Structure formats: C-alpha cells, structure tokens
Image (spheres, rainbow, N blue to C red):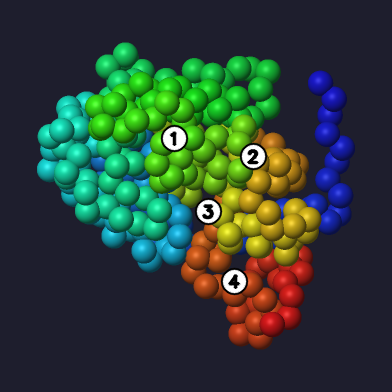
Amino acid sequence: MSLSPPLTAHERLIRERLERLYAETNFSARLRADPIRFPRRYTDEEDVALAALLSASFAYGRVDLFPPVLERLFAVLDEAGGPIQFVRRFEAERDASRLDWLVYRWSRGIDLTLLFLGLRRLFEQGVTLRRLFTRGLRPEHTSAREALDAAVEDLRDAVLSEAWRAKVDAPSFEALPRGLRFILVRPADGSANKRWNMFLRWMARSGREGVDLGLWTELPPSKLLMPLDTHVLRISKFLGLIPKEQGTWRVAEALTARLRRLDPDDPTRYDFALAHLGISGLCRGFRDAEACPRCPLLPVCDAPSP
C-alpha cells in the first residue's frame, strides 16, 4: 500500500481551522435541532435503525418544516408499539389510512405504505436493516458505495414485489410514486445520496461528540461519505475543498477524499459541525461584518461579498 503524501501547509491550516470549529461547536445544543434526535428516543436497536432511516428520508427542505412531519409520523408508529412493531404488523388495507395525512412537498402517505410493505417483506425473510446495509461490504471497498447500492436495490425489489397489496400497479421502479423514488435513490443514479450517507453516518460513527449512534460496527467510519446538504456544499466550496456546489455522488466522493486526507479514519467527522454552521445561521453565505469575525473558518474562507 502506497503512503499518502504529507499534508501541504494549506491542508494543515484547513485542518487546524476545522478542528477549531469542531471544538467550538455545542453538539448537545445543536442536537436538539437535528433529525437524529428522533431515533435517539428509542432504545431497541431495530427501532433506532428504522427511526433513523425514516428521519433521514424526510430530512430535506426547510429545517423547520420536516420535523413536525416526523413528530406526527412517530406518534402514529408509537401508538402501535413502536416503529418495528408497526412495520412488522403492517397491512395495507388496515393501516394505509393511518398515513393518509402525510403531505410534505412531494412525499405522500402512499410512499410510506409501499416502503413499509417492502420492509415487512425483508423482515419476514430475516433481513434486518443492519444486515441489509452491511452485507454488501467487502474489505477491498474503499467506501460504502457498493453496499449502499446493493441495499437500496434489494429494498426496491421488495417494494415492487409487494406493491400490489396497496393496489399500485408498478411493473418497474420508474412506475412507483415520485416520493418513494426520491427516498430510494442510490449511488448508481449519480446523485449525492445525502440522506442515505447521513443515515449511514448516524449508524456507523460513535464519535466523542455524542451525536451519532455507532451501532453498526461492521461499517468502518473510514468508508463513510460526506452527506452533501446545501450548507456543507456551500461552506466546502468557500474552503476550496470542492470546485463547485453540485450535489452529485462524484462531488461527495471528491469532498470525502479531501477530508480523508485530514482524518483518514473518520472523514465525516466534521460533517455535523459544518452543517450546523449553516443551519444555525452563523454562516450567512457571504462576507458579513458581524458574523464572519466570530467564525473559526475565516482565515481559510473565500466567501463572496454580499
């Protein structure tokens, strides 16, 4: 195995500044505004994993709009004994109406009905979420891409085989509702897969900041990819870590490669701090006389003027 070249002076400076950001981030306070707070309500590992999958799936759009959707969804699931019990016992004719209220951007109740039918089929076959997302891992893989592709493909197949139970005629994945196709995106499609990469980060990492869950020890943090939300994209561009703000898998790989240079064992370590720098409004996306002097990234930031 060839050794990586030593860090350049600029890379050392970026790492120093990212470490300062990491050290100054109030993780416990930011956790209250992060979707990972929902799976943290549960103690059973299977409940935690399913709650994490659902929370990540709906973590798109404005950060003040999707949490109420998740609150209501988990209230429905908890009435039935929790997420796993709800899905294991899910019957479309009986339970689909309990999801009819769901209207969030392009997501609808039918998307969850179909997703739950597919998950139930996998669970009946003895496939847990842990097994689904880790059985494709191989020592020679440099990232979780292949395992994620295989997991989503298996989930797509399970949904298609059960769609008739919801009276949905779907001979192919492309015939499924838009909202479900949005959930079941995969790396092979070329998009950044922000929500899946965030889900895997939650399940695999167990950093000292106390944010991620660290339950799936089969998945090394070194194989995780950066979840590219709008804030991470923008700030990474300001830092010169990526050439453009484009949410593609290729850009996710490129950013992760740059961060892996700084921390080979844990390249997504800075993700939470970077994302919440934007979510909190502390980074306003341009040079700001009030906010920028307080930002630890200022010496390496190339944010534009307003």
Q: Residue at x 24, y 37 (%)?
A: 83
Where is 302 relative to 145, above or below? below
Amino acid type shown at disc 4: Cys
Tell me the distance, in whole angstroms, between the alpha carbons under discs 4 and 1: 40 Å
Mark 4 falls on what kind of element? loop
Is residue 108 at all visible to an observer of this figure?
Answer: yes
**Quarter occupied by residue 127:** top left
Mark 1 — residue?
175
Q: Earlier in the sequence, mark 3 or mark 1?
A: 1
Identify the image quadrant of the C terminus. bottom right
Q: Earlier in the sequence, mark 2 or mark 1?
A: 1
Earlier sequence position, callout 2 versus callout 3: 2
Pointer 4 or 3: first along the chain: 3
Whichever of callouts 4 and 2 sits on the residue coming sooner in the sequence is 2
Label 2 crowd (10 A; few <14 / some 14-19 / many >=20): few
Marks 4 and 2 close (CB-CB < 8 Å):
no
**Residue shown at the point (62%, 32%) measured from the top left:** 188
Q: CA distance from mark 2 to mark 1?
A: 19 Å
